[in-house]
Image (cartoon, grey):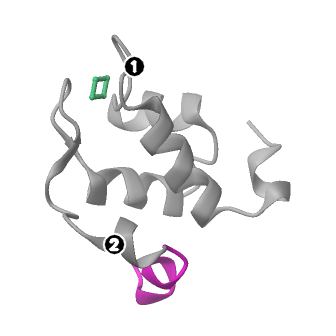
Amino acid sequence: MTPETLDKLPEILRRDLDENLCVCNEVTKRKIIDAIESGATTLAMVQRQTYASDGNGCCKRQVTRLIECLTTPEDSSQD
Ligand code: FES
């Protein structure tokens, strides 16, 4: 993850990068941010690459929030 990527996140979302954001599937916030950085700009794409939010989906809102912070609206219209 580049410093530029981290700069796009609000302070509160830069914490606990190595904690599991998706507890159900043990996916760290860092892995999710890396996936978004490398082109996963929708929830479905992040899900396919990392398994975060796959299953009962209780972390969907947090994953979506990260996508919103790290992508431009143009990016997220692509799948
Ligand atoms: S915490 Fe991610 S699916 Fe439950």
Binning the other alpha carbons within 10 Å of mark 1 as few (below 14), some (14 to 19) or many (20 upward) gives some
Mark 2–mark 1 distance (CA, rounded to whole Å): 22 Å
In this rendering, position of residue 65 left or right of residue 32: right
* Label 1 CB less than 8 angstroms from ligand 1: yes
Can you give x and y, in whole percent of width and height, for residue 63 in the image? Answer: 46, 42
- Residue at the disc numbered 1: 57
Query: Residue 69 occupies which quadrant of the picture?
Result: bottom right
The residue type indicated by label 2 comes to: Arg
Position of the N terminus by quadrant: bottom left
Highlighted range, magenta: 1-9
- Residue 8 at x, y percent in the picture: 55, 78
Q: Position of residue 2 (x, y in %)?
A: 41, 82
Q: Tell me how many marks there are.
A: 2
Disc 1 marks a residue whose amino acid type is Gly
Please name the residue shown 57% across and 52% down the image: 67
Looking at the image, residue 28 sits to the left or right of residue 5; the answer is left
Question: In what element is the residue under mark 2?
Answer: helix
**Crowd class of label 2 (few under 14; some 14 to 19; many from 20; radius 10 Å):** few
Residue at 41 percent across and 36 percent down: it is 49
Return the mark for residue 14.
Answer: 2
Compared with residue 7, is residue 34 higher up or lower down, i.e. above or below? above
Residue 56 among magenta residues = no
